[in-house]
Image (cartoon, grey):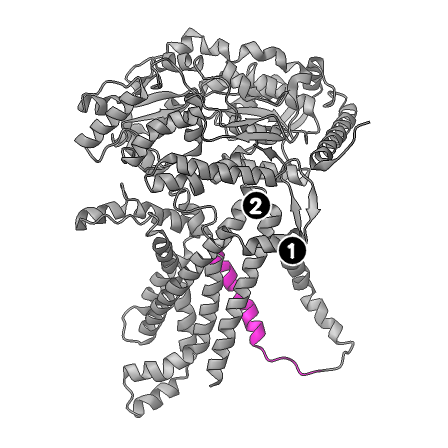
């Protein structure tokens, strides 16, 4: 027998006990529902569950959800999907976390951004979909999105979309300053200086401090500041990749070469439209945002590969979501079958129709998608740039198992460096300190 | 909004407290009838007020780990942490500064407005009364969003004014943020406080003014010797409302945070701190502790002001 001692061991036992309880509860439900059993399910259970029918609840803020659910219910009339928009981003997670904490009231299927997945998966709140044979789908998705739905040893969702980053730039502004599209970050900084010198009211890009952007930029530079395999967490926001990024970005922040306009505000949309912001690095979902919310910029914007540190192609994911099945679900087989339909089978088509950027290789290679000319981008075949980027995502990135909290306090720490136009390392250090403290308090063993 | 709600809440209690206590009477059967009348109120009060406070107090004695952890009883450790928590005090001193500067300005403006409307020298007083009160009717969230637009230094009203006067004031920068929030709160609540003062002025019997006029008192003399003393109670009540509202400052910074997340920290005000601890970090126990400590601080300061106010009135 093992000798049980210390907090960690106790925790592990509690975990195992919790997992066993959950499994037995799920198994109990499964036998009643006849369709599937969450404890030990197989792919065959999913088809049976779809046949049998039932009701599941689905929380998401994806714009294509309504069309997808309607198409699903057409195909499987016995299944009733209750679609709920519980808010976007943090509002959604707050409600999800509360439902999990309360032990009931949560959905069967929930949208979870890649950055939030470990936070729900590692404490054992999501169903490991390998039992339904979903690990066979690996080759159907891009490597970076497939890596994003893993946590620990488990598979906790199927990728819905992806956001490989590209550089979007305003051709008019670049022409005005006689600038070439930068291919390295050094050229990018040079372009930033030129723009500021010739027209102080313009700037190369906006960045007032954004956790999602920072993590993606560190990712692109090859940094791996966060690593975790469950309980043990390593945080190093001074690693080589991180310093590579701050080496470039400090020049922009300290010399006030970037506009301090926060993203997703009215000001931001306006500045993107009127040439105040000359370029911006965003995920491949950006064209939809431009087309819907930056009408004034129509015809002016183009897409190019991300600038890199050495001129060799490299990019990172920025945003993107998966759909996951909650342990709380009373009908996990049906919920998993819905996820499979949504992000692997017929559900992908309505998603593409609403302007989504897929994670499925077949669609990323489909000429109808790749060679589409987008009017907003002056007829440029933007998807060629973006699908190319999808194959160039740097490997090895992990988010923290409490990334949502980390994002919340980003402004308190790194935000201060932005505010005082000082070197970002100071802010990153403060961020790390706060994250280590929090992680230790919440039951992880950090560093 | 939260300010308004609590103020109404307080006004209900305040009225109750002002009533003289019933002199000691022996318990009789007829007393049970009273319970039937207050029963529904007490049930709701217990469920929505006492129970949550009790639960928060209970929570504050434990420490749970959000992820893998266990929950353990820690006694008063959380309270010790709060009192040594720089973030908590940072937020607390900020609202205290806000209290000392904003509340006198707001109440002063409300007083002037009430006296002006009551002076009967203005035309269309009911129109002015309505217009001054109108901001209070605007939902708090909408009001802050609207001011947020105006404060924008790239495209907002602030940008236009800066262009016009050649200044470069950024209302949402760290130097100006608190003043900008104070401006919003003042705008929202001057009308509300004006109404309290105005209704108090209306209760002054006309004969007193007549007597004063016969004695040869001018307008200023009337204000200083009759109106202001008559307003003393109302000013005290309004001050206490404002103290409570200030300590609960939440909506304004929380919404402006989306515009300036670097300036408005997660602990900008104690309420915001409690909110973010709970919903950002799942630190429910510590959050409950912060809420209780803040509630007690508010109660102590409000009580001190009330005590002082009633002593003044005795003189």
Q: Is residue B298 above or below residue A238?
A: below
SS at mark 2? helix
Between B255 and A394, the residue placed more toward the observer is A394
On screen, residue A27 versus residue B295, left or right, reads: right
Return the disc, 2 or 1, that comes first in the chain's sequence.
1
Between A111 and B169, the residue placed more toward the observer is B169
The crowd level at tag 2 (other Cα within 10 Å; few <14, some 14-19, many 20+) is some
On whether residue A118 falls in the magenta region, the answer is no
On screen, residue B163 versus residue B184, left or right, reads: left
Q: Is residue A157 above or below residue B129?
A: above
Q: Which region shows up in magenta?
A: B1-24
Residue A77 seen anywhere in this rendered image of the structure: no
Disc 1 chain ID: B
Q: Quadrant of the N terminus of chain A?
A: top right
Q: Is residue B63 above or below residue A1?
A: below
Q: Which mark is residue B278?
A: 2
Q: Is residue A329 above or below residue B108?
A: above
């Amino acid at each position: 027998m093992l000798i049980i001692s210390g907090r960690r061991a106790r925790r592990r036992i509690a975990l195992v006990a919790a997992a066993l309880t959950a499994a037995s509860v799920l198994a109990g439900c499964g036998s009643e529902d006849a369709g599937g059993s969450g404890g030990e399910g197989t792919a065959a259970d999913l088809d049976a569950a779809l046949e049998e029918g039932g009701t599941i609840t689905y929380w998401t803020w994806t714009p294509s959800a309504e069309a997808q659910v309607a198409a699903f219910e057409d195909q499987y009339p016995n299944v009733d999907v209750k679609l709920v928009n519980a808010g976007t981003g943090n509002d959604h997670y707050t409600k999800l976390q509360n439902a999990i904490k309360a032990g009931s009231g949560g959905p069967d299927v929930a949208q979870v951004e890649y950055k939030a997945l470990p936070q729900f998966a590692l404490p054992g709140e999501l169903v490991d979909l390998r039992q339904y044979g979903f690990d066979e789908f690996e080759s159907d998705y891009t490597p970076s999105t497939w890596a994003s739905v893993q946590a620990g040893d488990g598979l906790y969702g199927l990728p819905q979309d992806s956001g490989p980053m590209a550089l979007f730039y305003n051709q008019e502004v670049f022409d005005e300053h006689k600038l070439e599209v930068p291919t390295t970050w050094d050229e990018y900084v040079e372009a930033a200086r030129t723009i500021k010198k010739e027209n102080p009211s313009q700037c190369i890009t906006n960045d007032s401090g954004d956790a999602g952007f920072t993590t993606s930029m560190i990712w692109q530079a090859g940094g791996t500041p966060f690593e975790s395999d469950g309980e043990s967490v390593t945080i190093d926001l001074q690693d080589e990749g991180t310093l590579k990024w701050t080496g470039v970005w400090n020049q922009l922040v300290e010399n006030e070469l970037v506009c301090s306009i926060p993203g997703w505000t009215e000001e931001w949309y306006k500045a993107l439209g009127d040439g105040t912001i000359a370029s911006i690095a965003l995920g491949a979902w950006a064209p939809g945002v431009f087309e819907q919310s930056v009408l004034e910029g129509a015809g002016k914007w183009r897409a190019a590969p991300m600038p890199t540190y050495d001129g060799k192609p490299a990019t990172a994911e920025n945003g993107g979501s998966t759909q996951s099945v909650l342990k709380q679900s009373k009908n996990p087989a049906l919920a998993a079958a819905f996820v499979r339909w949504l992000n692997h089978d017929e559900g992908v088509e309505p998603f593409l129709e609403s302007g989504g950027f897929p994670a499925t290789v077949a669609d990323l290679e489909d000429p109808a998608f790749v060679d589409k000319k987008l009017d907003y981008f002056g007829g440029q075949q933007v998807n060629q740039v973006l699908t190319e980027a999808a194959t160039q995502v740097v490997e090895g990135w992990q988010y923290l198992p409490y990334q949502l909290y980390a994002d919340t306090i980003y402004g308190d720490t790194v935000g201060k460096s932005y505010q005082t136009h000082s070197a970002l390392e100071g802010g990153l250090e403060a961020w790390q300190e706060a994250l280590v403290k929090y992680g230790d308090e919440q039951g992880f063993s950090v560093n | 909004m939260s300010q308004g709600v609590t103020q109404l809440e307080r006004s209900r209690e305040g009225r109750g407290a002002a009533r003289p206590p019933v002199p000691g009477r022996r318990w009789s059967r007829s007393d049970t009838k009273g319970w039937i009348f207050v029963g529904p109120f007490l049930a709701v009060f217990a469920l929505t007020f006492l129970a949550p406070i009790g639960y928060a107090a209970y929570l504050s004695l434990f420490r749970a780990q959000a992820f893998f952890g266990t929950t353990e009883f820690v006694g008063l450790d959380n309270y010790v942490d709060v009192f040594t928590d720089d973030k908590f005090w940072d937020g607390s001193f900020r609202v205290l500064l806000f209290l000392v500067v904003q509340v006198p300005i707001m109440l002063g403006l409300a007083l002037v407005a009430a006296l002006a409307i009551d002076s009967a020298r203005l035309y269309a007083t009911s129109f002015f009364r309505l217009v001054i009160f109108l901001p209070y009717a605007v939902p708090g969230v909408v009001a802050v969003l609207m001011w947020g637009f105006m404060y924008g230094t790239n495209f907002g009203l602030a940008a236009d004014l800066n262009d016009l006067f050649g200044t470069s004031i950024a209302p949402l920068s760290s130097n100006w943020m608190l003043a900008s929030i104070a401006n919003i709160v003042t705008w929202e609540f001057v009308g509300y406080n004006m109404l309290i003062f105005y209704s108090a002025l209306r209760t002054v019997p006309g004969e007193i003014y007549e007597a004063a006029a016969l004695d040869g008192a001018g307008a200023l003399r009337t204000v200083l010797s009759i109106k202001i003393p008559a307003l003393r109670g109302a000013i005290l009540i309004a001050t206490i409302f404002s103290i409570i509202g200030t300590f609960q400052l939440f909506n304004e910074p929380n919404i402006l945070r989306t515009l300036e997340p670097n300036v408005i920290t997660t602990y900008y005000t104690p309420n915001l701190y409690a909110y973010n601890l709970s919903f950002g970090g799942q630190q429910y126990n510590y959050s409950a502790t912060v809420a209780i400590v803040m509630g007690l601080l508010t109660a102590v300061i409000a009580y001190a002001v009330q005590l002082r106010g009633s002593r003044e009135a005795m003189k």
